[in-house]
């Protein structure tokens, strides 16, 4: 029986392990030919020698199951290597239809202790890595659209995090990068809609080497599927990559353990208008201070206020 992604080609970055691996396997199961990208460094902080092993292993797993896959071991945060990734997809399978951006690293530290290098490296891999692949995929789809004079098939699924939504005290670089990815996604969605391309972003909650500290107190069940398994996230990626999701564009979705939440764009909570030509300090004090009077000093908004969700 044909799958919903039959005849389509997908790139999945960071696909050698964890979420990316589960997503690559799911796209292949649904019928897509998959370019499995992973730089292959063993450390979750991006340390260690790069290796072809993780990407090659996942590509072989797909082929062993009867699917089509090829490995790419370049660094997507490098502009030219991201170009090579797209070239590999188009030269091997003729075109690109789906881009799933997942590659990332962690270098956690409080903002007052973080070094410039720790900031730059995380922004580079997450945010610049997403931009690089998006840039080349978008150019590919635009050229195809110009050549045919019509809309083409294109799907982008980017990866943000609840660290962006709720804040994460020890991850200012990671939270900032993930927030930037949301902005990149919504901008891309607007820019490419006329070509037939959609761009959406997910905030997955899953047990991977990136989150081993976060979920250290939540042990895997002795039997059954782990509620935090990446396999809970992969079906949403498959859906967003499919023809069925043609009306889903510029959306942010939280996903984990059998739950999907669609997050609204920020809404105005309260509005205050000056009685003068412009605000002065005293008027702002009289209006805003009472509005926040019930909050303890220093308290920020909680994710539950925005999402109606509770963090694990």
Image (spheres, helix red, strand yellow):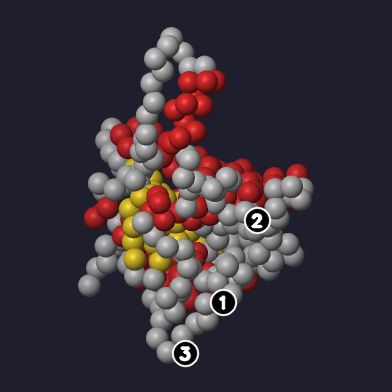
Give the secondary structure at mark 2.
Answer: loop
Please give left or right for residue 3 compared with residue 274 in the image.
left
For disc 2, the marked residue is: 170
Q: How far apart are marks 2 and 1 (CA)?
A: 18 Å
Q: Can residue 100 be seen in this view?
A: no
Residue 13: % across, % down: 52, 57
* Figure check: 47 above or below 96: below
Residue 239: % across, % down: 31, 60
Other residues around mark 2 within 10 Å, as few (<14) / some (14–19) / many (≥20): some
Indicate which label's residue lies in the foreground, 3 or 2. 2
Q: Of 230 and 276, which appears nearest the observer?
A: 276
Say whether disc 3 or disc 1 marks the residue closer to the N-terminus.
1
Say whether disc 3 or disc 2 marks the residue closer to the N-terminus.
2
Please give left or right for residue 222 compared with residue 154 in the image.
right
Determine which quarter of the picture holds residue 186. top left
Q: Is residue 230 visible?
A: yes
For disc 1, the marked residue is: 217
* Figure check: 75 above or below 255: above
Say whether disc 2 or disc 1 marks the residue closer to the N-terminus.
2
Q: How far apart are marks 3 and 1 (CA)?
A: 15 Å
Name the residue at 24% across, 55% down. 244
* Figure check: 231 above or below 171: below
């Amino acid at each position: 029986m044909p799958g919903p992604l039959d005849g389509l080609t997908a790139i999945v970055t960071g696909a050698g392990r964890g979420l990316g691996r589960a997503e690559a396997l799911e796209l292949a199961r649904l019928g897509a030919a998959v370019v499995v990208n992973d730089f292959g460094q063993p450390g979750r902080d991006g340390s260690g020698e790069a290796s072809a092993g993780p990407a090659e292993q996942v590509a072989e797993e797909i082929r062993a199951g009867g699917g089509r896959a090829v490995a790419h071991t370049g660094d997507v945060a490098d502009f030219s290597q991201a170009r090579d990734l797209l070239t590999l997809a188009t030269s091997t399978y003729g075109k690109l239809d789906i881009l799933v951006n997942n590659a990332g690293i962690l270098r956690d530290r409080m903002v007052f202790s973080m070094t410039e290098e720790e900031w730059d490296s995380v922004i580079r891999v997450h945010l610049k890595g997403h931009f690089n692949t998006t840039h080349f995929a978008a150019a590919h789809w635009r050229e195809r659209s110009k050549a045919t004079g019509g809309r083409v098939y294109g799907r982008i699924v980017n990866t943000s995090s609840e660290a962006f939504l709720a804040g994460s005290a020890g991850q200012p670089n990671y939270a900032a990068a993930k927030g930037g990815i949301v902005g990149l996604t919504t901008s891309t969605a607007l820019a490419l809609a006329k070509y037939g391309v959609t761009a959406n972003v997910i905030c997955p909650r899953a047990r991977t080497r990136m989150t081993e500290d976060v979920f250290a107190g939540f042990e895997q069940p002795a039997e059954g599927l782990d509620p935090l398994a990446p396999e809970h996230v992969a079906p949403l990626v498959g859906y967003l990559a499919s023809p069925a999701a043609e009306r889903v564009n510029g959306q942010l979705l939280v996903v984990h353990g059998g739950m999907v939440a669609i997050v609204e764009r920020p809404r105005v909570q309260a509005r205050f208008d000056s009685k003068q030509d412009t605000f002065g300090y005293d008027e702002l004090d009289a209006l805003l201070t009472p509005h926040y009077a019930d909050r303890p000093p220093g308290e920020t908004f909680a994710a539950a206020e925005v999402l109606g969700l509770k963090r694990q």
